[in-house]
Amino acid sequence: MLTNKKKGLYLTISFTILLFSSNIAEGNTLDNVKRTNLTNGLTVILREDHNLPLCSIQIWLKVGSVYEDNNYGISHFLEHLLFKGTKKYGVGEIAQIIESLGGRINAGTSKDFTILYFNVPKEGIETALEIATDVLQNTTFPSEEIERERLVILEEIKRQDDDPDSVLWNLFNEKMFSSIPYRQRIIGTTETISKISREDLLNYYQTYYVPNNASLIIVGDVETNKILLFIKEKFETLLKRELPSPPCLEETTQENFFFSEKKPVQQALLLSGFLGPTVENEDQYALDLLADILGEGRNSRLNKNLREEKELVFSIGSSYLTQKGSGLFIISARLEPEKINQVIDEIHQELLNLQKEGISDKELVRAKTLIENGWLFANETYSGQAHTLGYAVTLKNIEYAQEYLKNIAQVKKEDIKFVLDKYFQGKELSTIIFYPEK
C-alpha cells in the first residue's frame, strides 16, 4: 500500500512479535502533523521538522486518468505543460528559478491523482509557494509548447508500445477492468493525444485544478504558524469551483480470463491475479501481507518453491496495488516457455495451500517486519514523508498514513485465510502470457 519494495530480517518468532508490537506502540507513524482547511476548500498538511535545512512541497490533485472522458491521456498531457509558462513566469523560468535556489521541481500523473513536487532549501520555501500558486491558477498553455510536448508524448507512447512489460501491464488492466476507467492507460493513445486541443486542456485545467480538489503538503524545516499565514495570503486567492460527479471505480463483475500472445521477448512473461477491495476496505492490510508471504524476497513461498527448489522461473514476485477503487492482487514471473503450464499449476496450488492450511506464525512475523521496514525506509526523507501524507489524504484521509503500521500489526493469521476465501475463492487466476516469437 504505502510502501516501496520492502526489505528486512526477522528474529525468533516470540521476540519479533514483541519487538514489532513495541515499535508500533512507540509511534512509528507520521506524527506532529497539522491539518488546516482554507475557506476555498484547499487542504493544507504541515509537518515541521528541523533536522535538515530542507523542505518538500507537494501539491496533490484528485485528478488522474480515471477522470478523463474519452480524451484519454489529457491528465498526463496537462501535467507536461504545468511548468511551461504562466502569466508571471515565461517558458523555462520556473525551473531556472527553483534550480538557482538549489532545488528541484517535477510532476507526475497516476490513474487516481496528479502531483507537483518542489524540493527546496528552507530559504526557497516562499518562492516555491508563490510559483505553485501561479501554476495552479495562471498556467497559460502556449500553443508552441503544446505542440512540442505533444511530440514528446507521442514518442513516449511509441516507446511504451515497443516495451513488452508495459504492453503486458496495460493489457492486463484493460482485461481486468471491463467496466471502469482503470482499464485505460495513463499515457493515452496516439489517436487521442493527436486530437487533444488547447481548448480541451484549458477546460480540463479549469475544471479540476481548483483548491477544493487539491491538497498542499509541506514537510521540513518550516515554522508552522508563520508559513500557514503565508499560505493563507497566497492560496486563498484561488477560486473554488463545483466539481463534476466522480467516476465509478468499483468493478462489480469480472470473468476470469486466459490470454497468450507471441511477442519479441527473450523469456516468457507471465502476469496473473485477481481483483481486490477499494482503499476504504480494511481487507487491504491482509492482502499487503499475503503479497509479501507469497512473493517478496527469497524466503517467500513462490520464490522458495518455484525459483530455488524447482528452478521453474528466472524471477517471480507478488504485490497488492491499492487504488481509490478496486485494487489488484498481482503475481508476475519470467520463465522458459515450456514451463508455463507447470508454473501456472504451481502458483494456483500454492494459493490453494494457503487458503486451506493457512500460514505459520513465522511467515506472519516475517511479512510484518518486511512491511514495517519498507515503510520506514520509504519515509526517511522529507519528500518520502510528504508523498505518504499526500497519497493518504488524496485517496482516503490523513489517518490512513498515520495508522498504517498499526493496522498491519493487528492482522491475524485467520485474516489472511479470510481474504483468500473472499477474493481468490479457489478459482483459476486471470492470466496473460507473452511467449517469445522464436
Image (spheres, rainbow, N blue to C red):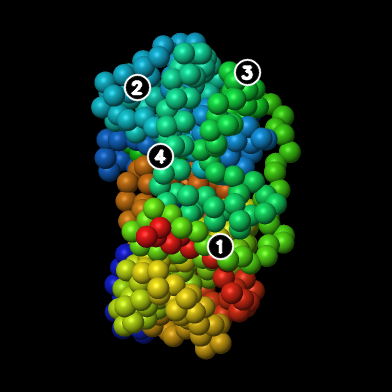
Quarter of the image with the C terminus is bottom left
Q: What type is the residue that disc 2 sits on?
A: Ala
Judged by depth in the image, the label closer to the viewer, 2 or 1, is 1
Residue depicted at x 62% and y 26%: 204
Upstream in the sequence, badge 4 or badge 3?
Answer: 4
Q: Residues within 10 Å of mark 1 (few under 14, many from 20)?
A: few
User: In this orientation, which residue lies closer to the viewer: 210 or 311?
Assistant: 311
Residue depicted at x 63% and y 67%: 256
Q: What type is the residue that disc 3 sits on?
A: Glu
Q: CA distance from mark 1 to mark 3?
A: 40 Å
Q: Are marks 2 and 1 in contact (CB under 8 Å)?
A: no
User: In this orientation, which residue lies closer to the viewer: 102 or 293?
Assistant: 293
Residue 96 appears in the picture as rendered:
yes
Asked if 32 appears above or below 61 in the picture, the reply is below
Q: CA distance from mark 2 to mark 1?
A: 45 Å
Judged by depth in the image, the label closer to the viewer, 2 or 3, is 3
Q: Where in the figure is residue 389, as x and y percent of width and height? A: 47, 47
Disc 3 target residue: 199
Upstream in the sequence, badge 2 or badge 3?
Answer: 2
Disc 2 target residue: 95
Disc 1 target residue: 259
User: In this orientation, which residue lies closer to the viewer: 193 or 420?
Assistant: 193
Q: CA distance from mark 2 to mark 3?
A: 25 Å
Q: Where in the figure is residue 315, as x and y percent of width and height? A: 34, 67
Determine whether, in the image, residue 7 is placed left or right of residue 41: left
Q: Are marks 1 and 3 in contact (CB under 8 Å)?
A: no
User: In this orientation, which residue lies closer to the viewer: 129 or 242?
Assistant: 242
Q: CA distance from mark 4 to mark 2?
A: 26 Å
Judged by depth in the image, the label closer to the viewer, 4 or 2, is 4
Q: Are marks 4 and 3 in contact (CB under 8 Å)?
A: no
Q: CA distance from mark 4 to mark 3?
A: 27 Å
